[in-house]
Image (cartoon, helix red, strand yellow):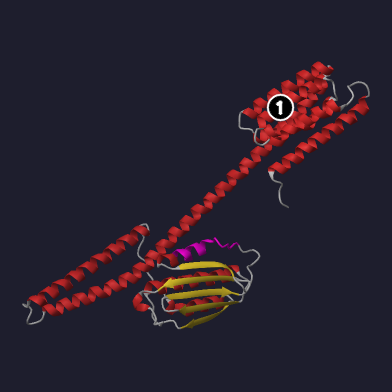
Amino acid sequence: MMALRPPVADRLLAAAAFVLGVAAALTLEAVAGEDERSVDLGAIALLGAMAAPLLVRRRWPILVVIAVLVVSTPYHLLDYPHEATMPALVVAAFTAARHGEPPRPAVATLVAVAAVILPVAAASGELGDAVLGVGWLLMAFFAGLAVRFRDNWTAAVTARLEQERADEVERRVAQERVLIAAELHDVLAHGLAVANVQASVAAHLIDQLPSGGDASLQELSGTLHSLSDTSRATLHELRAVLDVLHGGEGDPTEPAPHLGELQRLVEMAEAAGVRVDVEADGVADELPSTVSVVAYRIIQESLTNVVRHSTAKHATVRLDQDGRRLRISVVDHGPARPDSTVTPAGFGIVGMTGRAQAVGGELSAGPGESGGFEVRASLPLPEMWRAPS
């Protein structure tokens, strides 16, 4: 059910206070007989004037308390049924505690207590009635404080949970970046190691030639030696950077996986009870190492989510190379498990999105047309790897 907006709720509350006040005045007149002044248009007008400030109670809570008390004073002095003012006074006291800024609510309540006791005691001589009225006001005031405390506590807990989740997302993203860096290190290290070996061998062969004194060959040999030294230094720098990202831990002991090992993911999913169909039309047998690693990780995380969070027993992995981009789609065909906690903003999706963006791609994830969940990614291919269109 939709909650009433404050202006509408305040109008209804002011109207209710007025109606209850008039009803109480008429009832008390019938019970008390001639002990109090009869209810007339003046009494009804004063009761209406007491309820009117409640329309702006959230905006000026303290002024509303003062206005209600000011109007109630002549009402009591004229000896109308005194208890009829309680609905408006109770709402005003509650509002002062709930919406007023500390420490003004407490001051306003003390003013309310004094302003009610004095005119009631002076008008009727019934101190017990005055004390009873003050008791109602104090009860309303502390009820307002309790509601205020509950709302503030709920807001604080919600803010803390949101901050903890944001910190957790940031931590997971940082971990994912370290894994990406490790995999990129493997890819780059392999290429640089090959270049280093080839440059060293070529330089050595040139140095062994009988015509080693030729200026052009000497220049080529120097270039190859420089290339060998540079690639070796770059390898050491890559390893040092990776050590920093790992917090001083050792290098990864396994090479980065790639799409050539996709069958292993299929077998793992099927071992968990999920049949996986792979459709790879027009995809080159070999792809850039960075793109292949990212594609593998996206499919791995997507199938893991199917196994953990979906009731589906069937999933489809589609790979399509349209010339300039590699497109990936992982779709399951069943609703989420009732006890699943996966959300569109889950940590796994954050990691997959980060991986796709690391190579200039994009990723989207959400409910699919089949009623299950769908992950789609588009990864750009370097110029030399693009299929002819």
Residue interval drawn in magenta: 341-354
Q: Is residue 255 visible?
A: no
Is 200 on the left-hand or right-hand side of 37?
Answer: left
- Residue 89 part of the magenta segment: no
Q: Quadrant of the C terminus?
A: bottom left
Question: In the rendering, at what x and y percent does residue 261 appear?
Answer: 44, 78
Compared to 348, does 265 lie above or below?
A: below
> SS class of the residue under badge 1?
helix
Question: In the rendering, at what x and y percent does residue 14 appear?
Answer: 76, 36
> Which residue is found at the position 85% from the left and 25% from the top?
81
> Which residue is found at the position 65% from the left and 38% from the top?
148
Compared to 119, does 252 lie above or below?
A: below
Q: Nearer the viewer, residue 248 or 192?
A: 192
Is 305 on the left-hand or right-hand side of 170?
Answer: right
Q: Is residue 154 visible?
A: yes
Instruction: Count residues near mark 1 (Cα–Cα under 10 Å), then give few for <14, some for 14-19, many for 20+.
Output: some
Compared to 268, does 54 lie above or below?
A: above
Q: Nearer the viewer, residue 102 or 312?
A: 102
Looking at the rendering, which quadrant does residue 33 occupy? top right
What residue type is disc 1 on? Ala
Question: In the rendering, at what x and y percent does residue 208 appear?
Answer: 11, 80
Is 18 on the left-hand or right-hand side of 276?
Answer: right
> Which residue is found at the position 71% from the left and 51% from the top?
2
Is 128 on the left-hand or right-hand side of 338?
Answer: right
Outermost residue, left direction?
A: 213
Question: In the rendering, at what x and y percent does residue 179 appear?
Answer: 41, 64
Residue for badge 1: 67
Looking at the rendering, which quadrant does residue 345 occupy? bottom right
Q: How many marks?
A: 1
Q: Nearer the viewer, residue 248 or 211?
A: 211
